[in-house]
Image (cartoon, grey):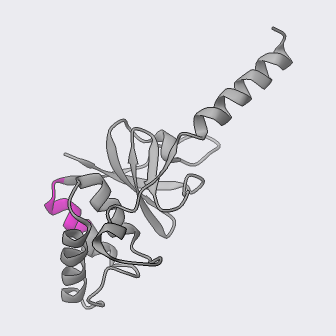
Amino acid sequence: MDLKEYKDWADQLLKEADAYSYQYNDGGRADSGRKGSAGDCVCRAIAIATGKAYDDVYRDLAKANKAAGGKASARNGLFRSVYEAYLNNLGWVWHSAPKFDGRKARHYDMPDGVVIVRMARHVACVKDGIVHDTWDSRKKMVYGYWAKA
């Protein structure tokens, strides 16, 4: 195999592997009777990562958001302090994303196991390198992640 054939083979292998790094998962949102789309990524990610019922996570976060001076809803975003405190209370710990020369951290740079990643204006669950979300957010850079302590 010459160098060009090797590069073509490697590129194809990477494309095939990347096709398996996203899994549609709404965290139980549809099963809870909710319809349509919403900006509830934090609620979905936590439900997926912890295995808690979507309704329970939604209710807890909405109540905490209202207590913090926001809306009594987890549908269209939350105060960061609200979901950070919630995750800390569940025993999850924040870690900054790994640093690389010449590129930003992505979902495939996260440790094995289950983590919740914070991206630009988005939060998602990553399980063993596979993004679990309602849309393919794999191209977003990762600022950091929460992992179970």
Q: Residue 84: x percent and y percent?
A: 26, 66
- View extreme (top): residue: 1
Looking at this view, is 69 or 49 the one in front? Answer: 49
Drawn side of residue 54 relative to residue 111, left or right: left
Residue under the point 33% across and 73% down:
80
Q: Nearer the viewer, residue 82 or 96?
A: 82
Residue 74 in the image: above or below residue 21? below
Q: Give left or right: position of 2 versus 140.
A: right
Report the number of discs.
0
Can you say which quadrant of the picture contains the C terminus? top left
* Residue 39 pos. (x, y %): 44, 76
Residue 96 located within the stretch drawn in magenta: no
Residue 33, given in percent of the width and then of the height, sits at 32, 76
Q: Position of residue 135 (x, y in %)?
A: 53, 61
The image quarter containing residue 46 is bottom left
Q: Nearer the viewer, residue 32 or 63?
A: 32
In-image side of 14 versus 90 (left or right): right
Q: Which range of residues does the magenta coloring cover? A: 84-91
Q: Is residue 126 left or right of residue 104?
A: left
Residue drawn where x is 20% and y is 78% of the image: 59
**Magenta region, main secondary structure:** helix
Task: Kindly identify the residue that appears in the image at 42 percent across and 42 percent down.
Answer: 110
Which quarter of the figure is the N terminus placed in? Answer: top right
Query: In this view of the protein, which residue sits in the foreground, 76 or 103?
Result: 76
Determine which quarter of the picture holds residue 19.
top right
| Residue 93 visible somewhere in the drawing | no
Q: Residue at x 77, y 17 (%)?
A: 6
